[in-house]
Amino acid sequence: GQSRKVEVGTRSVVSFQDIGGQNTAKNELMEALEFVLRPADMERLGIRPLKGILLTGPPGTGKTLLAKAAANYTDSIFMAASGSEFVEMYAGVGAQRVRQLFRDARQVARKENLSSAIIFIDEIEVMAGRRGQHQSHLEYDQTLNQLLVEMDGMSTTEDVRILVMAATNRADLIDPALLRPGRFDRTVRVDLPDRQGREAILMLHTRNKPLAAGVDLGQIALETFGFSGAHLESVCNEAAILALREEAEAVTHQHFKAAIDKVLLGEKLDRHLDR
Ligand code: ATP
């Protein structure tokens, strides 16, 4: 988004159990997080520390949730930023913000007495697209270079270990320099959910809703092919709003059907208006 707010560092409350489907992504991620959980063993075996994980896949599939769950799982501070926050008119400002982000992460972790921090950068392609393809080359290169400098300088012997997680739905735009060893060593694909994944997501987002007899989440999962987790969350919310309008005691299968149409229509409008 356009907003300039960098989320202040927090302890994350999202866990892997709050994420429906995405089993492959979760497993790959948890495996990679061993690096954060076992620094002494990594050191003993002389394993190069993992500094960055790139999450790729369509919007609304749970990349941000996965990063938050990773912070919770590893007892790390969670700091979130978006690539667009670093794009500035004046030379050096973007680079300055990158420095500040890493400084803040370390500071907040110390304050919270935690030995690790996860920095999450959404829409990384905005700041880390292929260099030399951007309008204001100079400023842009400085910002990306600063990110690389920070990552190259990170070490396991610091009092606060940092892991950078970045997300993009345009992996094709990423500067290959970012993917070199010692930078974003791992890429985890976060795809649209399959039928089982959709059912799991629907179950999560109806946990707090009264469902009428006859609501069949398996059937709804079948009928929502191509929906992302964010779409499915909308479907559940819209269905409940319809129930409220009708003063219904519980959300019915019909409410869900109507909500699916509503979300589909909104999606079409978005595309039409190029929003
Ligand atoms: P973007 O690329 O647009 O930033 P994202 O992949 O980071 O998207 P999230 O921000 O993690 O997506 O998801 C948006 C919302 O959609 C979540 O807050 C959640 O309500 C819902 N959601 C998405 N994926 C899942 C999932 N796998 N399980 C449960 N909820 C999900």
Image (tube, rainbow, N blue to C red):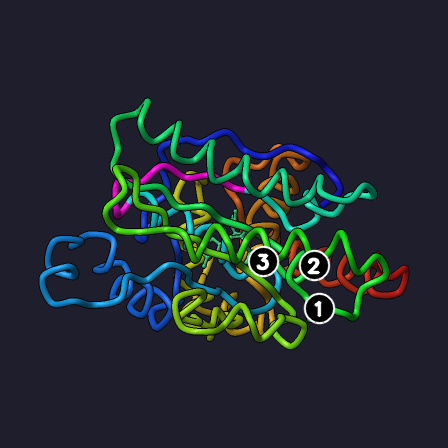
What separation in Å lies between label 1 and label 2 (alpha carbons)?
6 Å
- Quarter of the image with the C terminus in it: bottom right
Label 3 neighbour load within 10 Å: few <14, some 14-19, many 20+: some
Q: Disc 3 or 2, which lies upstream in sequence? A: 3
Label 1 neighbour load within 10 Å: few <14, some 14-19, many 20+: some
Residue 203 or residue 180, whichever sits in front: 180
In this view, 183 is above or below 259: below
Where is residue 173? Give x, y as percent. Answer: 67, 72
Q: Residue at x 46, y 34 (%)?
A: 103
Residue 75 shown in magenta: yes
Q: Is residue 30 visible?
A: yes
Disc number placed over residue 131 in the picture, else none: 1
| Relative side of 237 to 65, left or right | right
Q: Disc 1 or 3, which lies upstream in sequence? A: 3
Q: Which residue is mark 2?
A: 141
What kind of residue is marked 3?
Gly
What kind of residue is marked 1?
Arg
Kindly indicate whether the residue at mark 2 contacts the one at mark 3 (C-beta within 8 angstroms): no
Q: Is mark 3 within 8 Å of ligand 1?
A: yes
Q: Secondary structure at mark 2?
A: helix
Where is residue 114? Give x, y as percent. Answer: 26, 33
What separation in Å lies between label 1 and label 3 (alpha carbons)?
27 Å
The segment highlighted magenta reads 73-80
Q: Secondary structure at mark 3?
A: loop
Kindly indicate whether the residue at mark 3 contacts the one at mark 1 (C-beta within 8 angstroms): no
What separation in Å lies between label 3 and label 2 (alpha carbons)?
29 Å
From this viewpoint, which residue is outermost toward the top? Answer: 111
Q: Which residue is mark 3?
A: 60
Label 2 neighbour load within 10 Å: few <14, some 14-19, many 20+: many
Residue 119 shown in magenta: no
Where is residue 268? Give x, y as percent. Answer: 80, 65
| Relative side of 129 to 177, left or right | right
